[in-house]
Image (cartoon, rainbow, N blue to C red):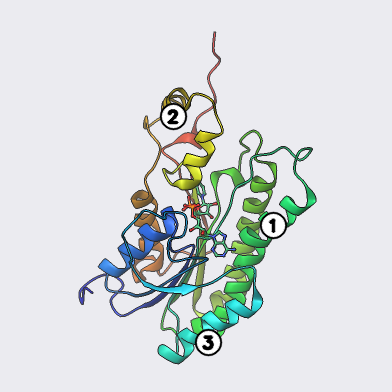
Amino acid sequence: MSDTGALHNKVALVTGGRGGVGRAVCERFEREGAIVYAADLSEGGSLESSDSTAGAFQRLDVTSEDEVIAAMDRVTTEHGRLDILVNAAGIEIEETIETTTLDQWNRIFAINVTGTFLTSKYALPLLRESAGASVVNFGSYDGYIADPQLAAYCATKGAVHALTKAMACDHGPEGIRVNAVCPGYVDTPMLQSFFQESGDIDTLQQAVRDVHPLGTYGTPTDIANLVNWLASDEARYATGQLWIIDGGLSAQVQQMKL
Ligand SMILES: NC(=O)c1ccc[n+]([C@@H]2O[C@H](COP(=O)([O-])OP(=O)(O)OC[C@H]3O[C@@H](n4cnc5c(N)ncnc54)[C@H](O)[C@@H]3O)[C@@H](O)[C@H]2O)c1
């Protein structure tokens, strides 16, 4: 653990901390000197083959109020405060509203939206004990503009964006900053499963790269770099904002294919 890093001695809990982005966030936080809890459904998360074990593993289903309370109880016992909460747990469902079942709709809202609500709600007493608390939620550029066949996912991310602003307004006076990171395409198991839905993975991957002004999609490290800044005291004046990081994807008007 670094004793000169930007997050030296800060206590952080990252949901989805064993997933593609969450794991990169845990690794970066540890390098910056934070004490990290990687909270996820399983030790392997979405990357069963990875040997990275950044952060102390905390079993957590973000849809379970009891498990969220138990996770915060552990942090209370071990540190008595929480400086950083990252809500990175999430799932994607590739359907239109017509092909989305009610069970799928309820499940994606339970994880992406209710999960963010529950962890934030029960973290608040611990965040109030911090000298400068930061919550980083995970929205998406899909909360602004829609990808085809991601209707429920887009709706959850729009909800997270609105919740982020509401939380920032309510808890700013208590010294708690709340922001959302809104990635475009990031190379994680979530993106790979999206590619595998297509028949020709190589063609789709190249098409996705080509549509970005920067000519490629992002890496988990790209996202972790922004999360790290938002979590740090350098971002002390940044709150209530939705930070799009998408290689310029949402900046451009789609060109006509003549
Ligand atoms: N990958 C992308 O292209 C992309 C783009 C925009 C936004 N995002 C968002 O970034 C966040 C991280 O996504 P990722 O790409 O790392 O996905 P990922 O699938 O690699 O990781 C998600 C993690 O969340 C965990 N998880 C799922 N349900 C859970 C639950 N009920 N309780 C606790 N943990 C649970 C999974 O086990 C997994 O480890 C998500 O909110 C996602 O919507 C990703």
Residue under label 1, please give it: 107
Q: x%, y% of residue 144? A: 61, 44
Horizontally, residue 24 falls left or right of residue 105, namely left
Reading the chain from its start, which is encountered first: label 2 or label 1? 1
| Secondary element type, mark 2 | helix
Q: x%, y% of residue 84? A: 44, 73
Q: In the image, what residue occupies the spot 69% across and 57% down?
A: 107
The quadrant of the image that shows the C terminus is top right
| Secondary element type, mark 3 | helix
Residue type (three-letter) at the residue carrying disc 2: Gln
Reading the chain from its start, which is encountered first: label 3 or label 2? 3
Q: Would you say residue 65 is visible in this rendering?
A: yes
Residue type (three-letter) at the residue carrying disc 3: Asp
Horizontally, residue 73 falls left or right of residue 31, namely right
**Which residue is nearer to you in this view: 87 or 194?**
194
Distance CA(mark 3)–CA(mark 2): 43 Å
Q: Which mark is residue 49?
A: none
Q: x%, y% of residue 79? A: 40, 88
